[in-house]
Image (tube, rainbow, N blue to C red):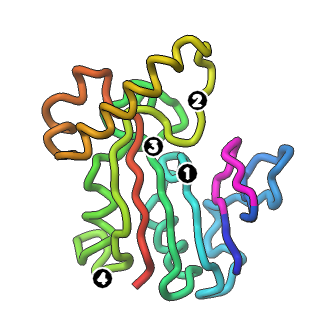
Amino acid sequence: MIILNLGAGDNLIKGAINVDITPKEGIDEVIDLTKIPWKWEDESISKIYLIHSLEHFPQPKEILQECHRILKPGGIIEIIVPHSSSAMAVGCLGHYRTYSYDTLNDYLSRPFYLFKEKMFETQKQELRWWYGRKVVNVPFWMLCFIIPLSKLINLLAGISPQVCENLWCYWVGGMKEVVWIGKKV
């Protein structure tokens, strides 16, 4: 079972092949993923992680098509991207775009104008107010407030992500990320 963590950066995943364009400790393979086709064979990968990396590619359509090509039938892709209401995401010079709650579901889980055929079946989709993987550069005393507040806001956002996104998420400083997990069809 081969698992890829593409555009790993500092988000290293144990048990996965951590791939990035920048050589550093923990990166298993240094590859420029904008150079397509990738070296992996068709339908040879069991799982792909794209954790805060898809937004850094100028051609997300080609990246997603390449992921689809190398994933085995029934393979899983986990994508975490910045939400469009996040000031930090919009203000990042390295981001080509941000995403709404429904972007990945709309484009990948049904025929749509960008992809003519359904590529994945949505397994999970959620909005997060705070980053789910790690908290960086936050004093410990602030975590006492951020963690419970994050759980509450995420719970409320989960009731109706579209209402959260279009009405009240700006009242809490915007949502940080969209999580989407799909299974290749």
Q: Nearer the viewer, residue 167 or 43?
A: 167
Do residues under tags 2 and 3 come within 8 Å of each other at their CB atoms? no
CA gap, disc 2 and disc 4? 38 Å
The numbered mark, 2 or 3, whose residue comes first in the sequence reads 3
Comparing marks 3 and 1, which lies closer to the viewer? Answer: 1
Q: Position of residue 131 (x, y in %)?
A: 49, 36
Instruction: Tell me: 22 left or right of 174.
Output: right
Q: Residue 181 sits in which quadrant? A: bottom left
Q: Main SS type for the magenta part?
A: loop
Q: Within 10 angstroms of label 1, few (less than 14), some, or many (20 or more) residues?
A: many
In what element is the residue under mark 3? loop
Residue 170 lies, with reference to residue 129, above or below; the image says above
Q: Nearer the viewer, residue 23 or 121?
A: 121
Q: Residue at x 37, y 30 (%)?
A: 86
Q: Which residue is mark 2?
A: 135
Q: Within 10 angstroms of label 4, few (less than 14), some, or many (20 or more) residues?
A: some
Query: Which numbered marker is on residue 87?
Result: none
For badge 2, the amino acid type reads Val
Q: Which residues are magenta?
A: 5-14
CA gap, disc 3 and disc 4? 25 Å
In what element is the residue under mark 2? loop
Q: Which residue is mark 1?
A: 51
Residue 49 lies, with reference to residue 152, above or below; the image says below
Q: Position of residue 143 (x, y in %)?
A: 53, 20
CA gap, disc 2 and disc 3? 23 Å
